[in-house]
Amino acid sequence: EETRRERVEEQQRVAGAQARMEGLEEEMQTLKARERDLTKQIKREEQQFQTENAELNKRARQVEEEQRIAVLAVERTRQVYEEERAKVIGLEEKSKQLKDEARARETQLTEKQKEQEREMARDLKVQQKRATEILRQMQALEGDVVA
């Protein structure tokens, strides 16, 4: 009877061990399934991350290109401004030069005109003297003719 009891206890221990073994196998299967699910989730998340990262990199390149274009536009605008400013300064200098030349010509013409007026006045005096001389000579001739 003791042998029988030992056998029963042994069978119970074996049955318990088998039950625990089956439980562990189920748990192992559950863990493997969980691992597969997590692996798939990680791969999806990695793929999503890579997609988002690629989009962000693309957008960053676009922003860099837009920034580069903006810098070039600013530089071109600055260059055009400097060119136009130089033109304006050149025109202002040319205008000043022309005004100075006009003033100088006006002064020169005024001096020439004054000189011409003086010459005309001298000529007029000479002509008046000549006319007076001719008038005297004519009067003298008339006096000789009357006498």
Image (cartoon, helix red, strand yellow):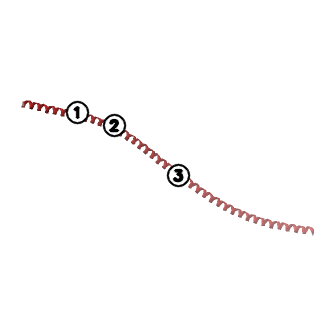
| Residue 26, numbered circle | 1
* Image: 142 above or below 58: below
Looking at the rendered image, the disc whose residue lies closer to the viewer, 3 or 1, is 1
Q: Which residue does the image show at 57% across and 54% down from the upper left?
A: 88
What is the quadrant of the C terminus in the image?
A: bottom right
Looking at the rendered image, the disc whose residue lies closer to the viewer, 3 or 2, is 2
What x and y, as percent, mark residue 98? 62, 57
| Depth check, front residue: 80 or 94 | 80
Disc 2 residue crowd, few under 14, some 14–19, many 20+, Cα 10 Å: few
Q: Name the residue furthest front.
A: 1
Asked which secondary structure carries label 2, the reply is helix
Asked which secondary structure carries label 3, the reply is helix
What x and y, as percent, mark residue 143? 90, 69
Label 2 amino acid?
Arg
Disc 3 residue crowd, few under 14, some 14–19, many 20+, Cα 10 Å: few
**Residue wearing tag 2:** 44
**Residue wearing tag 3:** 81
